[in-house]
Amino acid sequence: MMRGTLAQLGNTFDSLHETSERVAGLGPVVDSATQIQALRRQMRAQDKRQEARIGDVKHLVRDVLKDQIAEHMRVQIAEQIKEELASQVRAQVAAQLAERLPTSLEQQTEESKRQLAEVRCSLVNSEARRANAVLRANNIEEPLAHVLRSKDGLASDLFPKDLKALFAYDGVAAKKLVEDYGLPVSDQREKNLNRFMSHIGIPFHLIPVPVQDSANALGVTLG
């Protein structure tokens, strides 16, 4: 279409050139009023034809530009559609992978770390309970091996240094101790102490005995 437009432009310019040459060729021959009037009519007619041709060329150029703009927009819209489809495909693939692989690599790593920490805690506690199992009622001042809390793998600040220190805990301290280790809590001090002793591997327990000088007091013996 552009080639045809250029051809029409060339024809228009050739026609203008031929008219100019004819006017120039008349020269001094055009000397009468009749000839001048005829020439004017001829020039006006030629002007109208030229204006019509120029109008046709303008319309043609405008149509060509319109087609070119439409083609450019078509290509641009096609590219946008292609990008949008690619984006949707990526999103769908990611969603499907998330359904099939619900845990990400980072989550798997964290889970592995947690499991390793649990295994380490179990090993440490197993060794600590084995060490505490050799203690007897006659060596309550021997240091206790620390048993770690299962909730975080750390030793509690309430952990006693030895059995003598443990037996000095009152009811409130004994309750806090078993709570810190996630053990069942009792309202009785001796039950809480025995539960903790069993948890850390002590092979004996406390037995409440009545105290003779007080009807409300209890003594404790090891058994």
Image (tube, grey):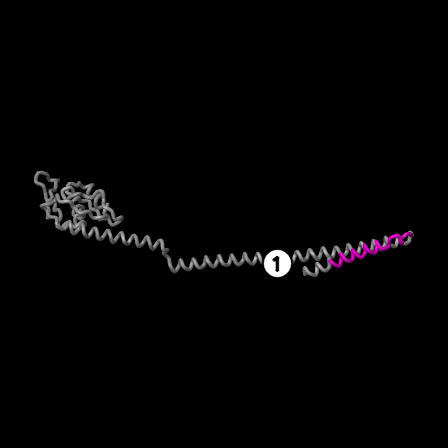
Image location (x, y in percent) of residue 94 = 43, 58
Image location (x, y in percent) of residue 181 = 23, 47
In-front residue for pair 84/168: 84
Say whether residue 152 is left or right of residue 19.
left
Q: How many marks?
A: 1
Say whether residue 57 is left or right of residue 85.
right
Say whether residue 14 is left or right of residue 77.
right
**Part of the protein shown in magenta:** 10-31
Query: Magenta segment: does it hold 12?
Result: yes
For the point 23% across and 44% down, which residue is it? 156
Quadrant occupied by the N terminus: bottom right
Q: Residues within 10 Å of mark 1 (few under 14, many from 20)?
A: few
Looking at the image, the residue that sits furthest to the left is: 212
Prevalent SS, magenta region: helix
For the point 90% across and 52% down, which residue is it? 31
In-front residue for pair 50/142: 50
Image location (x, y in percent) of residue 160 = 18, 43
Image location (x, y in percent) of residue 78 = 56, 58
For the point 71% across and 56% down, which residue is it? 59
Looking at the image, the residue that sits furthest to the top is: 213
- Identified by mark 1, the residue type is Glu
According to the image, label 1 marks what residue? 71
Say whether residue 164 is left or right of residue 112.
left
